[in-house]
Amino acid sequence: MALVTLWHLYPEEMNIYGDRGNVIALTRRLAWRGHEVLVRRLDVGGRLDSRDCHLVFGGGGQDDQQFAVMESLRANGDILRGLAADGVPMLLVCGLYQLFGHVFRTGDGRELAGIGALDLTTTAGRERMIGNVVVEAHLAGQSFTVVGFENHSGQTYLGKGVRPLGRVLRGGGNNGRDGGEGALDHHIVGTYLHGPILPKNPKLADLLLAWALQSVGVSEGLAPLDDRLEARAHDGIVERVMGRRASFGRA
Ligand code: GLN
């Protein structure tokens, strides 16, 4: 049995469309395999303990909430970049995805400085991208569909140091233009998808967990779980959005 410490970034400010559900999914899926999870929170003004961190999650928020956490996040920037370089897995959704990049230029002219852990920049567009999204994701040698819900004004463009999490089959994704959704660098996954994303996308959840177990030195693989309910939730959305029968795990 392993003890995994998960840091939840700014749960008060950065939690929309059920993003907190990702922490529940990660915790339950580890507990079902007999592992224990300690959830610690990073609040504004707090400091992340890099000696005790195996997994990081941060959700989305409105521009004002992003503004409210920005300085504190930057104060933890060295620690987070160091953990990322050490291979600690991180899932960042929407608002914190943007702030893990270099900068987010808001629609009202503010420049929100990010921590530059991901090589990307975001600028608000005139129209929000809102709706269900289906992505064909490619990571860790696997390809599978990922479903979720997006609602953002920011248009994100990736630099050379990162690649997209996948290709949008439906929805706007990073910027509504280049067909990319999210970002992947080492074990950091950034995405615009809420929902929350992980309960309906157990393959993505298990990849993050496998990486987290590696960071606590557990090398044995994750035991399979009965994911029939999760598969129905996932496939139902693909079917609704794509208008055709879905096959879980394949595009
Ligand atoms: N405020 C950001 C935007 O609109 C992020 C929104 C979000 O986290 N859903 O682009």
Image (tube, rainbow, N blue to C red):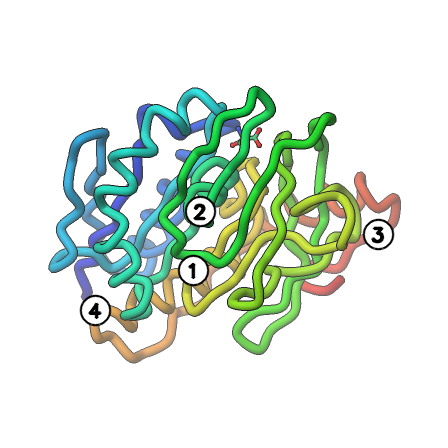
Q: Are marks 1 and 2 in contact (CB under 8 Å)?
A: yes
- Spatial distance from mark 3 to mark 4, Cα to Cα? 40 Å
Residue 204 placement (x, y as % from top left):
51, 58
Residue 41: which quarter of the image? top left
At numbered mark 1, what does the secondary structure look like: helix, strand or loop? strand
In the rendered view of the protein, which quadrant contains the C terminus? Answer: bottom right
Q: Earlier in the sequence, mark 3 or mark 1?
A: 1
Q: Residue furthest right?
A: 243
Q: Is residue 53 left or right of residue 170?
A: left
Type of amino acid under label 1: Ile
Q: Earlier in the sequence, mark 4 or mark 2?
A: 2
At numbered mark 4, what does the secondary structure look like: helix, strand or loop? loop
Residue 105 placement (x, y as % from top left):
54, 34
Please tell me which residue is depicted at 54% across the width and 48% down the height of the picture. Answer: 121
Q: Which residue is labeled 4 in the image?
A: 216
Q: Earlier in the sequence, mark 3 or mark 4?
A: 4
Type of amino acid under label 3: Arg
> Which mark is in front, 4 or 2?
2
- Spatial distance from mark 2 to mark 3, Cα to Cα? 30 Å
Number of other residues with Cα within 10 Å of mark 3, as a class: few under 14, some 14 to 19, many 20 or more: few
Q: Which residue is labeled 3 in the image?
A: 245
Q: Which mark is residue 92?
A: 2
Q: Which mark is residue 188?
A: 1
> Which mark is in front, 2 or 3?
2
